[in-house]
Image: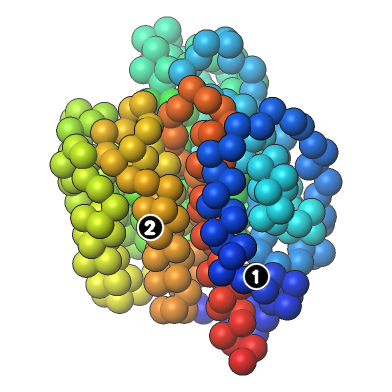
Amino acid sequence: MLYPKTTWRGSYSILRRSKQTWKKWLSTLNITDHQDMDYIHKVKRSEIVGLPIVHHHGYVSDLPIKHRFAMRKFHGVMRYLRKDNVISAKQMVEPTWIETADMCTVHTEDYVHKFLNGLTTKQEQRITGFEWNPGLVSRCRYETGGTLLAAKLALERGVACSTGGGTHHAFPEYGSGYCLINDLAIVAATLIRDKMVDKVLIVDLDVHQGDGTAVMFQHNDDVFTFSMHCGKNFPHRKQLSDLDIELDPGTQDEEFLESLSTHLPWVINSFRPNLILFDAGVDPHVKDELGKLNLSDQGLFDRDSFVISTALNLGIPIATVIGGGYQRDLDVLSRKHTIVHRAAMKIWSQHNMAIAM
Ligand SMILES: [Zn+2]
């Protein structure tokens, strides 16, 4: 099922940007700036102009101040997308939270019941990295709803991006590694259940293997899981994706991009998905505290541009999530996570210009 290409044309003229604009966007990535701005205004789904950006203030919930997981980065991503003039308010749309039945497409009913009601054991909570509280449940439901909305908008418009998502370490019966429910897997399974798509490709370029996602679809031919990650990193017990590419610690831009460009096109061409879900984790960055790979800002931008343009050139809708990223400076980290939106804006603009010419 392919979406009509004519819907891509909508608003290309206001998104036309010069090469200098892309360079300027990249140059703003490392500016530390604590000024806030009002970025909350959003439009209805039918009123979106340009590339859809999905965000909800409910992506964030309270954590202890020194917690390693930088929860407030989700606000930071949207703030810097607006502040750096990457997107307009007319692109921003708000999701509803995910339904319980959708969560049960890949998680066991027992786990969903325990997670929703705070019945997981202390040991189970320790593995997730979070002490359970009702705010975490709400946060996960909005974040997964955001990935679902981005996927649906991608089916309509070719590409759409959330400002959260990528909780790929959650397994059917338990959470793990800061991931409580698996948004990528839930969305893939929900769209297939609802017959909106037949086949989904999950491209996971977070530095950590998408182990939970791999397990959920290991016996399912309708979802192809492709994970490219650092071999010597969490999770130490790897699972079997449909395609795993393990990279050595210290891998740099050129080697990473060469490996990606060797594998992604044949995966898409042979599997022919109706939709790609792309986890654009920024933890392969050289300055990431948990990553162990050595990608630069430009390398991440080129990576994301390659994935999105390859999908669109082959006529496959693509929805992006931000995945992992670990740096203590919240401003720098938040801006790193906007690289995928900057790349999507560039490809969106170029693609629409190409159609218009
Ligand atoms: Zn990660």
| Front residue (pair 39, 125) | 39
Image position, residue 110 (x, y; %): 45, 27
Residue drawn where x is 60% and y is 32% of the image:
32
Q: Is residue 84 visible?
A: yes
Residue drawn where x is 31% and y is 33% of the image:
291
Label count reads: 2
Distance (Cα) linking label 1 and label 2: 20 Å
Q: Quadrant of residue 213?
A: top left
The mark found on residue 198 in the picture is none
SS for tag 2? helix
SS for tag 1? loop
- Give the residue pinned by disc 1: 17
Image position, residue 295 (x, y; %): 33, 45
Residue drawn where x is 56% and y is 69% of the image:
19
Relative to residue 107, is residue 88 depicted above or below? Answer: below
Relative to residue 285, is residue 235 depicted above or below? Answer: above
Q: Is the shortest distance between ligand 1 and the CB of mark 2 under 8 Å?
A: no
> Which amino acid is tagged 1?
Arg
Residue at the bottom extreme, as displayed: 357
Mark nearer the viewer, 1 or 2: 1
| Front residue (pair 349, 111) | 349
- Give the residue pinned by disc 2: 303
> Which amino acid is tagged 2?
Arg
Viewed as shown, does residue 352 lie left or right of 238?
right
Q: Quadrant of residue 266?
A: bottom left
